[in-house]
Amino acid sequence: MDDQRQLRLQSALARCAQGETAAFAEIVQAHQAMVFSIALHYLQDRGLAEDLAQEVFLELYQRTAGIASADHLTYWLRRVTVNRCIDQGRRKKHRRETALEDSPEPATTDGATDPLLSGRLRESLAALPERHRMMVVLRYQEGLGPAEIAGLLEMPVNTVKSTLHRTLEELRRKLTRKLGEVRYAIF
Amino acid sequence: MQFSEDDLRTALKPKDPGPGFTQRVMARVGQQEKSAPARKPRRAWFAWLQPLRLHPAMAAVVAVLILAVGSLIGYRQHQERERQQAMLAEQKAVEALRITNAKLNHVFRRVRQSEASEPKIRKEVL
């Protein structure tokens, strides 16, 4: 996070704590992609992800006075989103059939990447156990280190490291199996 | 099939929820504001706490000061209570001594009376 953005958010937080709603809109705009994407990649349902993201921001609105800094805000948002996602995932077990293919994909992929591979990766991710899926999302979407992930998920760092390693292996196995099925269908 | 960590990063690239998300959140905030009682202005009560949140060392110093002042007040109150109890005990002791004095005087008078009347009786008997 660059200094200018951090200062802007700090000022928005201060104004928001004084009841200025326009400042809160600024905060939402700055973090909506992060909150929404964690929910989307975890729940694999655009509608649910948007609802969850809105709920997170509504909760934030009630608690802006308790947020001390821009870093604290980011940490708070990640933590609340992660907890809500896990709760939501427990309430309703999502099926892969209602996954990302149903939703319009915003144009974020660049020319150098394989959209098919990205799609397959997201599908395989959806089949992972809850905590493993959240670890992968936090590691590769948010770029967090094992210590930060361990803090958010309240588990030992070594468990995070070993789980991430095993999860990547599992993803590779799943993807190979899928590709094998596709080849079989073609030939 | 092999994939790199960069492929994962690309697949999990943050996505914007699309146009209108902020407006939808703000609309819900507005609804919440209408349905709930007006948010109390926090600045009046909590503004002075804001610097403490940002500076943990300052917060620690303030906490130590509050503890010291609290302890001093507690100690003074304890001393005052003990002084009052001592005064009460002193008053009780004085009262007890006064009663004892009165009783002893009474007994002494009776003894004197009985001593005065006893020789006469003895003479009469002899």
Image: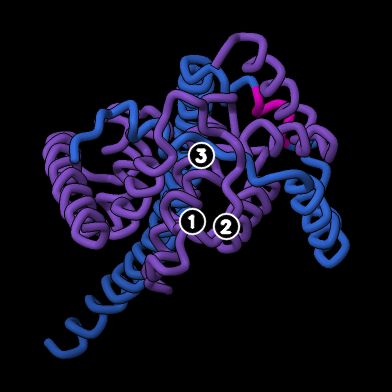
Discs 2, 1 touching: Cβ within 8 Å? yes
Q: Which chain is purple?
A: A
Tell me the kind of residue under disc 2. Answer: Ser
Residue B30 on image: x %, y %: 85, 55
In the image, what residue type sits under mark 1?
Answer: Leu
**Does the magenta stretch mainly form a helix, a strand or a loop?**
helix
Q: Colour of chain B?
A: blue
Magenta range is: B46-50
Badge 3 marks a residue whose secondary structure is helix
Q: Residue at x 56, y 63 (%)?
A: A48
Q: Does the magenta stretch include residue B10?
A: no
Residue at image mark 2? A103
In the rendered structure, the residue with mark 2 lies on which chain? A
**Residue B9 falls in which quadrant of the image?**
top left
- Looking at the picture, which amino acid does disc 3 mark? Trp
Q: Find out whether residue B49 is within the magenta segment.
A: yes
Sort mark 1 into few (<14), some (14-19) or many (20+) by Cα contacts within 10 Å. some
- Residue assigned mark 3: A76
User: Viewed as shown, does residue A186 lie left or right of B72?
Assistant: left
Near-viewer residue (B100 or A121): A121
Q: Quick check: B30 above or below B11?
A: below
Q: Name the residue under label 1.
A: A100
Upstream in the sequence, badge 3 or badge 1?
3
